[in-house]
């Protein structure tokens, strides 16, 4: 895993930790069901629906244990990938794209992903590829495989249709509206071009910053020397103009 991906994952973990810590505490302390349970002398019951190899689930587990030190409640962890558990197919169908999900006293209270983020993994979401042959190019999510992978396609940007892990992508704020699930490359190209995603991306501060960084990396020693001379000349002219104005 690259250093960029590692730092991004750590940042997501910290943000989710802070958010669930506060949001979970509000939910547990202000919920009417908790109040009724407390009045009846019952302990609130929390169920955390998780999956296999789910790093966000691990973060929420740790946070629930922290909150548990201040607010007593029962907690149960339910892995929707464990076929030995009761009703596992029901909950897998409901939450396979949303885990981790918290239930409080039998009612769904929050999906960690929905509560913590404004950008969702969804069909039509435009992503920036971070690794491989298509690094730096845009693609569109056309199908969600599971909580680790999705199928992306970018016929307008030169990205071949492929299954890719989320950790090798970055979600952009752009969405291709109305894109049918599992669309072929021809349909993806039609909707992508209609949404003017490339134009919107080119105008974004994010794209301009990446372009400036790329130009700086590709600058040769001779180019840097010329830039230094031009900056030196600019400073000289500015100082000369300032001195002339001061004498006037």
Image: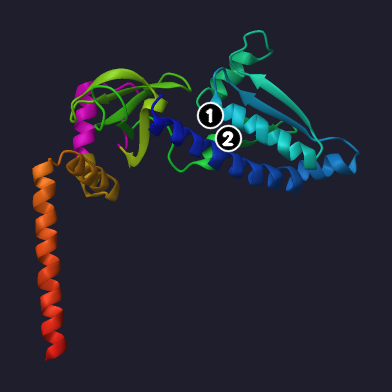
Residue nearest the observer in this picture, 225 or 77:
225
| Residue visible at 31% across and 25% down in the picture | 131
Above or below: residue 152 compared with residue 172: above
Q: Are marks 1 and 2 in contact (CB under 8 Å)?
A: yes
Residue nearest the observer in this picture, 200 or 170:
170
Q: Quadrant of residue 162?
A: top left
Answer few, some or many: residues within 10 Å of disc 1's Cα (few below 14, many 20 plus, some between 14 and 19): some
Helix, strand or loop status at disc 1: loop
Q: How many marks?
A: 2
Above or below: residue 178 compared with residue 79: below
Q: Check if residue 152 falls in the magenta segment.
A: no
Answer few, some or many: residues within 10 Å of disc 2's Cα (few below 14, many 20 plus, some between 14 and 19): some
Q: CA distance from mark 1 to mark 2?
A: 6 Å
Disc assigned to residue 196? none
Helix, strand or loop status at disc 2: strand
Q: Check if residue 177 falls in the magenta segment.
A: yes
Residue that badge 2 annotates: 111
- Image x and y of residue 24, in percent: 67, 42
Q: Which stretch did the figure color magenta?
A: 176-195
Residue that badge 1 annotates: 98
| Residue visible at 23% across and 33% down in the picture | 191
Protein image colouring: rainbow
């Amino acid at each position: 895993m690259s250093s960029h991906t590692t730092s991004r994952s750590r940042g997501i973990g910290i943000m989710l930790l802070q958010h669930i810590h506060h949001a979970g505490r509000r939910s547990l302390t202000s919920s009417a069901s908790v109040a009724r349970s407390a009045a009846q002398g019952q302990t609130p019951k929390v169920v955390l629906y998780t999956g296999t190899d789910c790093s966000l689930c691990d973060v929420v587990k740790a946070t629930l244990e922290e909150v548990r030190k201040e607010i007593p409640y029962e907690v149960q962890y339910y892995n929707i990938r464990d076929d030995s558990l009761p009703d596992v197919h029901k909950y897998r169908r409901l939450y396979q794209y949303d885990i981790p999900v918290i239930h409080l006293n039998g009612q769904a209270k929050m999906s960690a992903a929905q509560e913590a983020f404004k950008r969702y993994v969804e069909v039509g979401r435009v992503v920036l590829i971070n690794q491989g042959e298509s690094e730096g190019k845009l693609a569109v999510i056309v199908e969600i495989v599971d909580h680790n992978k999705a199928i992306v396609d970018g016929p307008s940007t030169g990205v071949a249709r492929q299954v890719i892990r989320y950790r090798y992508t970055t979600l952009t704020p752009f969405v291709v509206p109305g894109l049918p699930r599992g669309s072929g490359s021809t349909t993806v190209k039609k909707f992508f071009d209609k949404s003017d995603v490339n134009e919107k991306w080119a105008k974004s501060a994010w794209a301009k910053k990446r372009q400036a960084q790329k130009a700086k990396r590709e600058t040769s020693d001779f180019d840097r020397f010329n830039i230094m001379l031009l900056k030196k000349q600019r400073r000289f002219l500015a100082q000369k103009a300032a001195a002339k104005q001061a004498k006037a």
